[in-house]
Amino acid sequence: MTASVLAAGVLEETIRAFFQGLPIGAGFALVAMSFVLTYKTSGVFNLAFGAQAFISAATYYELHVRRDWSIWLAVLVAVVLVAPVLGLLLERLIFRHVHAASAVAKLVISLGLLVALPELFKLIVDYNREQPFGAVGIIPDGTTVYRLFGRYPVTRDEIAAFVIVVAASLALAALFRYTRLGLRIRAVVQSPRMTELNGVNADWVSSGSWMLSSFFAGLAGVLLVPTTSSLGTVLEPTGFFPIVISALAAAALGRLVSLPAALLGGLALGVVTTQMRTHVPRDNVILAELQGPALPYVMLFAIIVFWPAIRRQVAGADPLLGVSPPPPALAATSRSRGMTIYTRVMALAFFTAVGIWTFGYANNFWISRITHSVIFSIIFLSIVVFTGLGGQIALCQVTFAAIGAFGAMQFAQRWDVSVIVGMLAGAAIAAAVGAVLSIPVMRLGGIWLAIATLAFALFFHDVLVKYDWVGGSLFHGRGVPRPEFFGVDFSSRENFLILCIAVLVLVGVLVILIRESSTGMALRALRGSETAAESIGVISWRSRVIVFSVSAGIAAIGGGLLAMEEKLVGYESNYDPQTGLFWLVIVVVLGARTVEGGIQAGVAFVIFPELVLDRWLGLHGAWRYVLFGFAAISFARHPEGLLEHGKRRSQAMMQRMFARRQPAMAAATTGPAVPTAADPEGEP
Amino acid sequence: MSDALEPTAAPTAAESPAGATVAAPAPLVIPVLELRHVNAAYGPFRALFDVSLTVGEGETVALLGRNGAGKTTVARVASGLVEPTAGEVMVDGNDFTKARAHRYAKAGVVHVPEGRAVFSDFTVEENLTLAFSRTHDRSGVRDALSRAFDLFPPIAQRRRQIAGTLSGGEQRMLAMARVLVETPRLLIADELSLGLAPIVTDDVYAVLARIREAGTSLLIVEQHMSHALALCDRAILLDHGAITWQGPSAEAADTLAATLFDTGGE
């Protein structure tokens, strides 16, 4: 008797959780389908999707809440007008021109847009970021509660979201399955040139599909507003992150290409979330954590690592890729010895001048800025190691920097160890974490690696930092002392700057050593052709795990130094994942392939907003996000970075000045070079 | 033998750019395709130097030359895939120099690129449907599909298979089925025989002969010269991105042998 009553109670709870889970899952499914749609229609793993959703949601908010437009008019403008136009602009101005670029390059561009678009929107619209959004859905009286079967409560918003998502998924499935347009959209993604040979205007199809996917992003943004704001967040692009992560997990179930899998996956994950909250016991710490914010990250990570379909994914290459011109070589590999010596002398002179000025004349403010530049140069060298040498994107360098900072703090606070030892211990921990993290995902590489590392960064940010043994306790604070060792006191600004410069030199030399080592050579080979490299015995994932782990250690050393410089771990201002995205963008824009590139990025990151934007141009500091974000577009065309590109151009100019071109010679030497690339089969 | 060739053997393009076209039979009507003094490049690499040629109505032309001579680039310029850096491209007397590839296709100039030029993520049927759906409605597509499968029985058995998983020869057949079912104005075929079994090559050339009878002009890029010369009225020899000789196919074989072997070709 009691058993059956208990069972009935459990059953009722299960059903209730099921109905609570469906609307949440519908939100996941909508975002997941938008990801799949963008990926299917553009070949871009579009992280800027979050920015597009944000812009529509914020437009809706501006119009409906602050300017009192009617719901329907506001939705019309935000979703039906603004979103497709944004998609059209992105396609016309950016993505059309980078079709031949690698998936990783496109990911970097979308990251740049994710950083740039919301900031640009805020600067243009004068968007008030302080005011909380309030739960304003697109359905009148959306919070009205209905009771399914007389007992399970659902709101009008939830019903509307569910119905819209299901209807949208049916419409999309029909588009791809039964219409010519759907077939053409898929064809353009594979090869715009082949599609053109079939008499289809690839540009039009491409514009249309971007407008469609942007429309879905906008719809998702507006529909998810009640969900994100009920979490108590101010409407910010980062507010979408937990949902985006869950949605990515759903999209990953269908390898980013299956719309039905995204829909069912999203709904299932929503239901799983609420079922876990209902049934899993809370007395176990780990299980309790899984019911909270940790769940989406764990799900995503688990799916990426264990879902077999992802491992089998082979991207179909464009058979007419050979029509595009081949990428040029690094300038340093082809420049003359004289140029090299000249460049080095100039650099030495410049640094000597800066050094004399810093230690002789600069005030405290500028010494601190220069120290920051040096420290960020160290951190950015970790990106040079992994992205520049390895050719892969990891989005958790910021987390490793935070581990270094917290390591220095914890060791100093708890065991009274020298802060330098603490920093080195933090670096060792970061390297170990990096290795453990990367072993399962490094085999996948490409965008899956980027997604998995983003999931880890957000997991650290949302879950781990709250623990005393990671982020420190309120009682102790996050103070970090300046170091003192071998009897030298580095607590003064000047002495600490000298220490930082010494570390930078050591790390720079280390990076060059890695580049010239056999691991570095293996990485270069892998960047050329993974298949070819593996055929001569390079084990791709092993080389990558090694550099990933080294890169994590470097980032942690930089993070530790930053904490010492600021005398505390400024986690919120320095190490949140959004900042990490900007780090990556600025490094790849300026030059991820060389040590100079990393240092230039470090200087630009610190000095540019202060000096150029604020003092010279009188602009808001947020413009740096806009400028560098859009500059990420250049990554597709100049993967070596803008500075390297400039170097190469000036070098080409010098060569032109000194040598007359001989067309006949050029014909004899370069004529056959390209068609052979296009005739891989060779002469029969 | 070489005396007989004297009038048609043009000097090198560098000396007399117009020389190449002088030797071509002056067309009485407007040619289907005309390249006028075309240069082309891939980024910094120049691939074509002052190439001029015509393909007349119903004419079949073989484009011959060694690896890297620029044959594929000529084919790409002639179908809009590569925009020339100088010179003009005319289709039926209209200026197509700046036109994109889909406009060439709509004008009836179709191109079968070399290699496995199929949509590798599509099924066989989807590949063909994409090609046929521009000019046909739903039932027309069905008819065209069945004609394609009649033409190439091996791929008929694999109509629902993903194209990327077909063998190399089957992928070539699929790429050809896309264009051979219709009778285009001009068919540009790049290395059709590459990767095909000899017996299949014979079949393919039989199909080409049939669509030539139907009135289609042909521009055939080939390294297997015997097939191409047997099919074509005229041959054009490319070397280092420039036209070195053109004339009737009957005279081509000897000239080719002389040119290729004298200059150390294979």
Image (cartoon, rainbow, N blue to C red):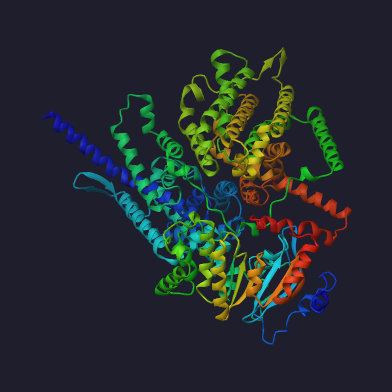
Task: Tell me the quarter of the image containing the N terminus of chain B.
Answer: bottom right
User: Is the residue A507 above or below the residue A63 in the image?
Assistant: above
Residue B221 is left or right of residue A156, and the answer is right
- Residue A132 appears anywhere in the view: no
Question: As rendered, which of A306 and A64 lies closer to the eye?
Answer: A306
- Residue that protrudes farthest toward the left in the picture: A1
Residue A645 location (% of width, % of height):
73, 48
User: Is the residue A672 above or below the residue B15 in the image?
Assistant: above
Residue A447 location (% of width, % of height):
53, 44
Task: Tell me the quarter of the image containing the C terminus of chain B.
Answer: bottom right
Question: As rendered, which of B147 and A30 lies closer to the eye?
Answer: B147
Residue B236 is left or right of residue A447, and the answer is right
- Residue that protrudes farthest toward the bottom in the picture: B28
Residue A17 location (% of width, % of height):
28, 40
Residue A663 location (% of width, % of height):
83, 62
Question: As rendered, which of B31 and B235 lies closer to the eye?
Answer: B235
- Residue A377 appears anywhere in the view: yes
**Residue pictured at 33% horizontal, 47% vertical:** A23
Q: How many marks?
A: 0
- Residue that protrudes farthest toward the front in the picture: B1
Question: As rendered, which of A148 and A332 lies closer to the eye?
Answer: A332
